[in-house]
Image (cartoon, rainbow, N blue to C red):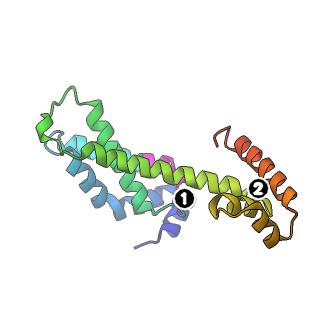
Amino acid sequence: MISDIELLKLLHDKPEEGLKVMMDSYMALIYTIIFNKLSGTYSKEDIEECVSDVFFQVFHYKNRIDLEKGSIKAFLAVVAKRKAIDMYRKNKNNNHIPIEDLPEDLYSMVDDVANSLLLKESKSVLINAIKSLGEPDSEIVIRKYYLYQSSKDISSDLGIKVNTIDKKVSRCIQKLKNVLGGIL
């Protein structure tokens, strides 16, 4: 089986071949995820269309795949779950499923996945913003807000005056607010 790095490179360099390899590698997984969500409610053709939509969406957003955040397999699985849920919600008026047939923890499962993905994405954006501050600013922010070190301790460790540490922290927070669009 091809590695994620090789597959991503193939998707960028030879898109059609990359898509074929991705589909060959993960078709069964994606079909199973969607089938488990939609069987009994949708036809085989609808399920196959949803599977195709998953691969099309992942192919379309291939530039957004970040292997540091997770594997291509995980990315595909999340997209498949979302597509299946979207398909169910979009057509729920046409295909009524009695409430007693739904799993009791369906909504909590969806919320857990969505919240987990949002939290992971938020942390990643914040870490990248902190890294963009450069040294020693990024180190000062990490020590202050992640390691909970006092300005005095940071000062002694880095050999920078305490009042300079405090000024840098204040300026860094302002820079981070600007970088993150006021969210901090």
Q: Which residue is found at the position 34% from the left and 43% from the top?
A: 83
At which x and y percent is residue 132? 74, 56
Element on which disc 1 rests = loop
Report the mark closest to the observer, 1 or 2.
2
Q: Is residue 80 magenta?
A: no
How many numbered badges does the structure rendering display? Answer: 2
43 or 38: nearer the viewer: 38
Query: Could you tell me the amino acid type at mark 2?
Result: Leu
Question: Is the C terminus in the top left, top right, bottom left or bottom right quadrant?
Answer: top right
Note whether residue 30 is visible: yes
Q: Earlier in the sequence, mark 1 or mark 2?
A: 1
Note whether residue 50 is visible: no
Q: In this view, does 127 lie to the left or right of 86?
A: right
Q: Is residue 63 magenta?
A: yes
Q: In this view, does 165 lie to the left or right of 48?
A: right
What separation in Å lies between label 1 and label 2 (alpha carbons)? 22 Å
Q: Is residue 96 left or right of residue 123?
A: left
Question: Is the N terminus in the top left, top right, bottom left or bottom right quadrant?
Answer: bottom left
Marking on residue 66: 1
At which x and y percent is residue 57? 44, 46
Element on which disc 2 rests = loop
4 or 99: nearer the viewer: 99
At which x and y percent is residue 98? 12, 34
Locate residue 73: give its quadrant: bottom left
Judge the density around disc 1: few (<14), some (14-19), many (≥20) Cα neighbours within 10 Å.
few
Q: Which residue is found at the position 47% from the left and 62% from the top?
A: 70
Marking on residue 133: 2
Magenta part of the chain: 57-67
- Residue furthest out toward the top: 93
Q: Which residue is found at the position 21% from the left and 44% from the top?
A: 38
